[in-house]
């Protein structure tokens, strides 16, 4: 079962010169840790910089341009995982032992990323393999869903389920407001 699409909101204090956009995301985690997230942006996509398709590869710094992000943590545990997916097919994965405290990078297979853009929509679906996400049968998984959208003038818009701080900070665990458990998983 896929979660219903959830609205991501733009951080109200970060400068944004881009168009008015509607951003939504949904996700599912399968028993064993495989997962899938879908993001959809509706509005004037021509006013955004959408990275062109490239050879899928792991890459750092994706957040400097249009990309979609997923943060995963087991409820009550300080450690969390950050996954970044770009429309280009590039991706990144980072592990943290606590708030912004880098841990050894996770070893995982390359995700499958499908992206499509029209004048009015940008969509991205990312599928990650087993063992990537915390298995929700072992307890609740807290999820933060986010997007960084780049306007054609270079301004970045920061969109998330919740912005708990005055500055955009997707790592703030108070923003991991989606909870997945066995009720929203598929086998």
Image: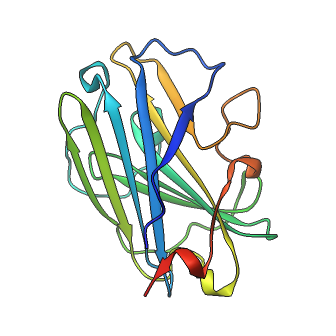
What residue sits 38% from the left and 58% below the top?
A: 58
- In this rendered view, identify the residue nearer to me: 104 or 156: 156
Q: Is residue 6 left or right of residue 125?
A: right
Q: Is residue 116 left or right of residue 44?
A: left
Q: Is residue 178 left or right of residue 17?
A: right
Residue 33: x, y in percent? Answer: 50, 81
Using the rendered view, name the quadrant where residue 15 is placed: top right
Q: Quadrant of the C terminus?
A: bottom left
Residue 74: x, y in percent? Answer: 71, 72
Q: Is residue 168 above or below residue 175?
A: above
Residue 3: x, y in percent? Answer: 48, 63
Residue 96: x, y in percent? Answer: 69, 61
- In this rendered view, identify the residue nearer to me: 144 or 53: 144
Q: Quadrant of the N terminus?
A: bottom left
Q: Is residue 151 above or below residue 161?
A: above
Q: Is residue 27 above or below residue 9?
A: below
Q: How is the image coloured?
A: rainbow
What residue sits 42% from the left and 19% below the top?
A: 20
Using the rendered view, name the quadrant where residue 73 is placed: bottom right
What residue sits 50% from the left and 78% below the top?
A: 185
Total number of numbered discs in the rendering: 0
What residue sits 26% from the left and 35% below the top?
A: 121
Q: Is residue 102 above or below residue 49?
A: below
Q: Is residue 79 left or right of residue 3?
A: right
């Amino acid at each position: 079962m896929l979660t219903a699409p959830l609205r991501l909101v733009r951080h109200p204090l970060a400068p944004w010169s881009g168009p008015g956009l509607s951003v939504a995301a949904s996700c599912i985690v399968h028993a064993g840790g495989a997962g899938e997230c879908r993001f959809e942006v509706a509005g004037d996509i021509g006013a955004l910089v959408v990275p062109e398709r490239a050879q899928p590869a792991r890459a750092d710094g994706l957040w400097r341009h249009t990309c979609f992000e997923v943060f995963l943590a087991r409820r009550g545990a300080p450690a969390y995982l950050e996954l970044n997916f770009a429309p280009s097919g590039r991706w990144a994965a980072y592990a943290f032992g606590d708030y912004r405290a880098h841990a050894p990078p996770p070893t995982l297979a390359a995700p499958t990323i499908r992206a499509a853009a029209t004048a009015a929509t940008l969509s991205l679906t990312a599928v990650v393999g087993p063992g990537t996400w915390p298995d929700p049968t072992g307890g609740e998984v807290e999820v933060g869903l986010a997007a960084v959208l780049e306007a054609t003038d270079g301004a970045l818009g920061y969109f998330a389920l919740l912005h708990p701080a005055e500055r955009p900070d997707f790592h703030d665990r108070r923003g991991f407001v989606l909870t997945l458990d066995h009720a929203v998983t598929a086998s």
